[in-house]
Amino acid sequence: MSRAPSFKILSRTRKIKIGILTLCCLSALCLIILLIGVSLTRPPTSSEEVVNFDVPVGSSSRTIAKRLIAQKLIRSEHVFRLAVRYRGTGKRLQAGTYVLRRNMALWDLLDEFEKGQVTLVSWTVPEGLTTAAIAELWETSGFGTAAAFRKAAESQHLLERYGLTDKTVEGYLFPNTYKFAKGTTTEKVVEMMLDEFKQQWTEKFEEEAQNLGRTRHEIVTLASVIEKEAQSDLERPRISSVFHNRLTRKWKLQADPTVLYALGNPKSPLTKADLQVESPYNTYKYKGLPPGPIANPGLDSIVAALRPEKTDYLYFVAIGEGKHHFSKTLSEHNRMIRKMRRASRKHVP
């Protein structure tokens, strides 16, 4: 009879403990929900300062969260990762540079990441550069290494995808100004340049090449030689006519830039010994076009290769200020060479 009250007291005590524990859990849960709500809706600061925030290629939500904490753009790394998982943002994060404000709430910040409106950088590739020179430009511009660019330019996958028969994409990296997100891979940029060439090479161009009895590769190769020879847009069709006339006669092109390409484009002037270098690119030794482009030509040179001026010229020589003298006969050509040599000797101090 005396044990019943003890049991009731014990039962009442347990209920009280359970109630207190439940209340503590609910309070903790409410606190967590409150903290999450604060992190999601309240910015870490009222400052309107603009911050450029980089998301490197392949970044995980953990990595991005740590970078955001380091730049004091969010309140909690854990809340950020929970929100990313809840919204599924992790699968839609794009690499690049985002323009953010310090007074952005986490929810708004995630909106920016999901939009993927990254800041684009510009990269200008001039006409007439070799692939090796473009690779060096890629490195000096701070986008990556020259070695990585050369490797991408020799990708067998890309060569097959774009129907290129050489071992590199030489001649098909279209000169232009490109805009892309910071952190874009080298391979992607090479693809952008190849896509631009593909867009520029129209069906009309293909038809014109066929009418000349030339393949696309031959026209691009000729255009690259014209690009290296011409300094004036007005002279491109005329220089093209000289090469077309020589090709029709099955003569050697005797184009200095092809020899320079064979020698690795040295800075020093060509010598007579250089003109004897053993290379299929040496158009002083071998007839016809070199086996492939010697640079990446622009649109004007491609058009000039397809639409040469109608002339009887077979020779040309530089006469200064980016201009050339064109001749129909070898004797006239040689007279002009002698004249230019005499003029240069007069100017030697």
Image: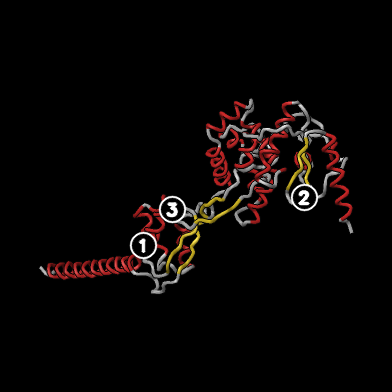
The residue lying toward the viewer, choosing from 332 and 120, is: 332
Say which of 157 and 21 sits in front. 157
Q: Where is residue 236 in the image (x, y as percent from the top left)?
A: 67, 41
Q: Residue visible at 47% across and 67% down?
A: 51
The tag on residue 108 is 1
Quarter of the rendering occupied by the C terminus: bottom right
Mark 2 vs mark 1, foreground winner is 2
The crowding category of the residue bearing disc 2, from other C-alpha atoms within 10 Å (few below 14, some 14 to 19, many at least 20), is few
**Residue 43 visible in the current orientation:** yes
Residue at the image point whose x is 27% and y is 67% from the top: 30
Work out whether residue 152 can be spotted. Answer: no
Question: Where is residue 42 shown, x and y percent of the image?
Answer: 34, 69
Q: Nearer the viewer, residue 89 or 294?
A: 294
Residue tagged by mark 2?
320
Please, what is the three-letter code of the amino acid marked with disc 2?
Answer: Gly
Image quarter hosting the N terminus: bottom left
**Real-space Cα separation, disc 1 to disc 3, in angstroms:** 14 Å
Residue beneath the point at 49% across and 59% down: 97
Q: How far apart are marks 2 and 1 (CA)?
A: 61 Å
- In the shown orientation, is residue 67 left or right of residue 104? right
Q: How many marks?
A: 3
Q: Which amino acid does label 3 sit on?
A: Leu
Return the mark for residue 174: none
Q: Mark 3 points at which residue?
A: 93
